[in-house]
Amino acid sequence: MKLTVIGMDIAKHVFQLHAVNANTGEIERIKLKRSQVTDFFAQRERSLIAIEACGSAHHWARELQKLGHEVKLISARSVRPFVLRNKTDAADARAIWTAIQQPEARMVAIKSESQQAILALHRMRAQLMKFRIMQTNALRGLLYEFGEVLPEGYREFAERISGALAKIADRLPAILIDSLREQWARAQSTEKEIAALERRLKVALRENQECQKIAEIPGVGLLTATAAVAAIGDAKTFRSGREFAAWLGLVPKQTGTGGHVRQLSLSKRGDTYLRTLLMHGARSVIIKGSRTAWLDGLLQRRPFNVVVAAVANKLARTIWAVLARDSRYTPPVVAL
């Protein structure tokens, strides 16, 4: 039996639905308040509900699955071309309904609450990292005005900041020195909060077998392993490792006409945070890891940053293979 397709545009307070009656061809445009959504679908026959992957989409997908409906999350990039004229809730719902029926529509795996919880920890850590960088940069700039030049990088900065403050304490007003020390105390407090989040991520790593499997891959550590498993959701959503790498923006953009295709720089689409972690992991593999003939040859032919992107692409494909095939990482026997 073919399910009725419903396009649903979600928001904080008002939800817009778009569907077409298969028997009569009548177009249904329904507006619901947030409190009415669950009751409405509890009384509705089993349907295919399409939702654009955006804020709270995973929550609503889980709730509607509990009611027996089939739910698909569709990428916003796949929906955008079908918003033809004025962008309204009704137009968005119609665009979702149209996009979900296209053969090339890109789906997003529905995440569990535990996966979203891990991603929330990563977001909080990333925010605290930005706070710490802003605080130390402000201190570095203020001390530079008084002749004290401190190094970049948190560890070296932390080693020298106390001595720098002590050196200028005798010749500058106490109100400034006290304020600088309070600023440094805030930066240290932020560092402690970051360490606490990392300890919680380590607990998540120990409790998740998938995280442990991909953590065995050279270049994949605590942050990359936990973020990858949480962000991917179900690895089988991607048909191949190359498709996963493309989702992360680790493949080149293409342009061409008349049968001639040119490859450009990295597309940089998809999950920026996970792509950044993979790039850092790739640099670690190149600088500290064991070399292969493939890697040495690439370093001789191409610039360093291009090689980093190539290794990050290989890491992404390896992660997909381990997760999608439910296997463990096996080091290559021969050079690639």
Image: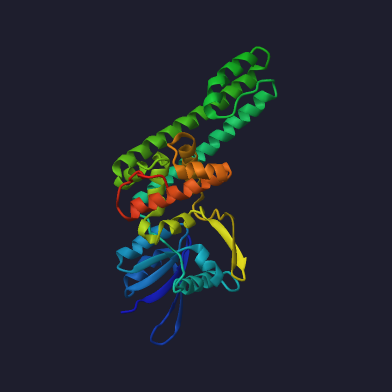
Residue 234: which quarter of the image?
bottom left
In front of the other: 224 or 40: 224
Q: Is residue 266 above or below residue 145?
A: below
Residue 204: which quarter of the image?
top left
Q: Give the image location of residue 325, x and y in percent.
A: 31, 55
Quadrant (top left, top right, bottom left, bottom right) of the N terminus: bottom left
Residue 195: which quarter of the image?
top left
Q: Is residue 203 visible?
A: yes
In the drawing, does residue 288 fall left or right of residue 329?
right
Q: How is the image coloured?
A: rainbow
Q: Is residue 62 above or below residue 197?
A: below
In the drawing, does residue 184 fall left or right of residue 239?
right
Q: Which residue: 48% across, 29% down?
A: 189
Q: Which residue: 48% across, 57% down?
A: 246
Q: Give the image location of residue 131, x and y in percent.
A: 54, 36
In front of the other: 14 or 271: 271
Q: Is residue 180 above or below residue 20?
A: above
Q: Give the image location of residue 170, x and y in percent.
A: 65, 12
Q: Which residue: 37% across, 66% down?
A: 71
Count of numbered marks = 0
Q: Which residue: 58% across, 30% down?
A: 136
Q: Give the image location of residue 314, x and y in percent.
A: 44, 49
